[in-house]
Image (tube, rainbow, N blue to C red):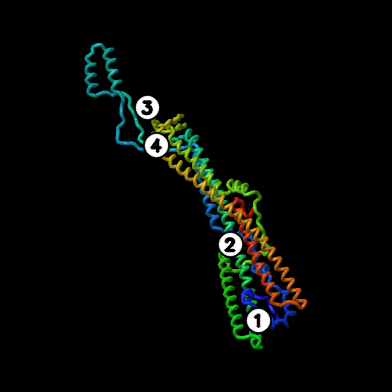
């Protein structure tokens, strides 16, 4: 019969009652002990290998939050184009047509017809023919007057090019600078979002790896207890053990089954969380790379890292750009209360031209160049109120910046100390694992020489397995700690 390793639950119950009855199998156990539990091999079981960098990259590629940031950046870039369009001089083109009716053609200087007839009668009484002729000619000229003919169908085409000179210098350019600052702020927020996604995905991957490791150990423990159940049943039939001994091993098996069920549930949840993080909805198990690559940590003292974090954290940089954008908007808003000075060039071709008297039924081109000056006290009052609102918003953003800086300092300190503690824990666990391996080899050599007990060998093997799980957890904790420190400083996990 092949004797496997002692399970964790069975070891807790004690195996002293088996010692007198299994000594005959020690030689076989030494040979069997060469096939040991391999945690790395268990973690490597799966349809596809997945390492930390794969997880981070896939999470960034598939996260809906990244698409949201792209939309925000596109909206900010549209604001820049809108502000740039305001720099282009304004061109207004107009065309008009009108039909006018309901009035007769008029005269200028025509006089009263009755008065003119009376004057002609008086002129006829003049005896001198020359004087009479001159008098009648004057009366006829006055009667003829000037006839004004207004075209019934009127047409007009005009173009006006305006340059709001003061607005461009005082309002449009600051608004453009503010729009560009908003784009930079959105890009920095997108960078901060990507780094949050990277960290969350890496933590999900490490939780999944830990759950896989716990399940592997729990499964091995259950299998060991199951083998012990068969051995106890054989010894019970031979009269070496009693029914209470069988009840004890069956209880240990039930506990091992419960532990494995809990571990399977934890793996299922961790797999779903990891799938959501990387955009994979498949429920198949991913193989975990046995050598979890360290991402490394930034070098420098805590003071140097703090200074770097305040300068490089994208959320702080985004807030600074947002404040800069608001200040530019304030400048543009304040300019709304200043006098407005502009230049313009206008051209017109109309039939009839309004600048020709009397009107002529023909198209006549005209043009003009001028400057405008306007100012309204109402605009001044509006700009004062609007700038006060912006000042309050800027003050609030600056206060939030101080709060975020304090949070960054605290996060950095926690990550820094956490990385140091995780590194020390890994060193301690590594020493423990090495000690357990040495103890196991010593027990195995004793058993091969006919000394010692099989229980001692299996207890040593149990300590090795436990140390390997602890070493896996320590490496995972160090990986998370290093990732958090990189995130706290403002470095990407993919750099």
Q: Residues within 10 Å of mark 4 (few under 14, many from 20)?
A: few
Q: Mark 2 or mark 3: which comes first in sequence?
A: 2
Position of residue 260 relative to residue 162, above or below, is below
In this view, the mark in front (4 or 3): 4
Query: Would you say the residues marked 1 and 2 are in contact, meaning their CB atoms lie under 8 Å apart?
Result: no
Q: Nearer the viewer, mark 4 or mark 2?
A: 2
Question: Mark 2, residues whose alpha carbon is within 10 Å: few (<14), some, or many (≥20)?
Answer: many
- Residue at the spot of label 2: 204
Residue holding disc 3: 357
Q: CA distance from mark 4 to mark 2?
A: 55 Å
The answer to whether residue 11 shows anywhere in this view is yes
Nearer mark to the viewer, of 1 and 2:
1
Residue 10: % across, % down? 63, 76
- Residue at 48% x, 33% y is 165
Please name the residue shown 58% across and 73% down the image. Answer: 259
Q: Quadrant of the N terminus?
A: bottom right
Q: Secondary structure at mark 3?
A: loop
Instruction: Between residue 142 and residue 43, name the one nearer to us.
Output: 43
Q: Are marks 4 and 2 in contact (CB under 8 Å)?
A: no
**CA distance for labels 1 and 3:** 130 Å
Instruction: Find residue 115 and report its horizontal and vertical position in percent.
Output: 23, 21
Which numbered disc flags the more N-terminal residue, 4 or 2? 2
Residue drawn at x 66%, y 83% is 231
The picture quadrant where one finds residue 57 is bottom right
- The picture places residue 209, in percent across and down from the top left corner, at 62, 65
Q: Residue 17 shows which numbered tag?
A: 1
Question: Which label sits on residue 101?
Answer: none
Describe the element under mark 1 as helix, strand or loop: helix
Q: Residues within 10 Å of mark 3 (few under 14, many from 20)?
A: few
**Separation (CA) of disc 2 from disc 3:** 86 Å
């Amino acid at each position: 019969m092949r004797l496997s390793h002692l399970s964790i639950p069975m070891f807790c119950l004690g195996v002293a009652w088996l010692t007198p009855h299994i000594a005959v199998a020690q030689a076989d156990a030494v040979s069997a002990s060469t096939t040991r539990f391999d945690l790395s091999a268990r973690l490597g079981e799966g349809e596809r290998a997945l390492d930390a960098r794969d997880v981070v990259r896939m999470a960034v590629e598939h996260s809906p939050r990244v698409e949201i940031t792209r939309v925000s950046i596109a909206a900010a870039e549209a604001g820049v184009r809108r502000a740039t369009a305001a720099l282009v001089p304004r061109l207004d083109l107009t065309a008009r047509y009108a039909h006018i009716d309901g009035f007769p053609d008029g005269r200028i200087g025509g006089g009263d017809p009755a008065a003119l007839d009376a004057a002609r009668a008086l002129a006829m009484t003049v005896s001198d023919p020359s004087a009479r002729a001159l008098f009648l000619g004057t009366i006829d000229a006055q009667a003829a007057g000037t006839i004004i003919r207004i075209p019934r169908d009127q047409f007009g085409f005009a173009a006006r090019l305006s340059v709001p000179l003061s607005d461009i210098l005082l309002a449009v350019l600051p608004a453009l600078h503010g729009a560009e600052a908003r784009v930079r702020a959105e890009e920095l927020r997108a960078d901060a979002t990507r780094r949050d996604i990277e960290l969350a995905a890496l933590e999900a991957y490490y939780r999944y790896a830990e759950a896989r490791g716990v399940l592997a150990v729990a499964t091995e423990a259950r299998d060991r207890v199951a083998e012990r159940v068969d051995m106890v049943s054989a010894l019970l039939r031979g009269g070496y053990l009693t029914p209470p001994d069988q009840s004890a091993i069956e209880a240990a098996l039930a506990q091992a089954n419960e532990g494995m069920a809990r571990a399977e549930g934890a793996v299922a949840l961790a797999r779903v969380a990891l799938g959501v993080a990387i955009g994979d909805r498949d429920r198949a198990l991913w193989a975990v790379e046995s050598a979890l690559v360290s991402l490394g940590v930034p070098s420098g003292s805590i003071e140097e890292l703090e200074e770097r974090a305040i300068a490089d954290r994208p959320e702080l940089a985004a807030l600074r750009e947002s404040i800069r954008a608001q200040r530019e908007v304030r400048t543009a808003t304040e300019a709304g209360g200043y006098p407005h000075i502009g230049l313009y060039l206008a051209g017109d071709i109309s039939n009839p031209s309004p600048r020709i008297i009397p009107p002529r039924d023909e198209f006549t081109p005209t043009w003009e160049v001028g400057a405008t000056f306007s100012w309204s006290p109402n605009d001044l009052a509006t700009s004062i109120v609007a700038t006060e609102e912006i000042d309050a918003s800027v003050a609030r953003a600056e206060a939030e910046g101080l709060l975020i800086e304090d949070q960054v300092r605290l996060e950095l300190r926690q990550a820094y100390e956490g990385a140091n503690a995780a590194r020390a824990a890994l060193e301690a666990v590594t020493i423990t694992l090495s000690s357990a391996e040495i103890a196991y080899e010593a027990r195995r050599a004793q058993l091969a020489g006919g000394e010692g007990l099989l229980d001692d060998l299996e207890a040593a093997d149990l300590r090795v397995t436990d140390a390997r799980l602890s070493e896996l957890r320590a490496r995972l904790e160090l990986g998370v700690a290093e990732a958090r420190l990189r995130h706290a400083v403002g470095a990407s996990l993919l750099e």
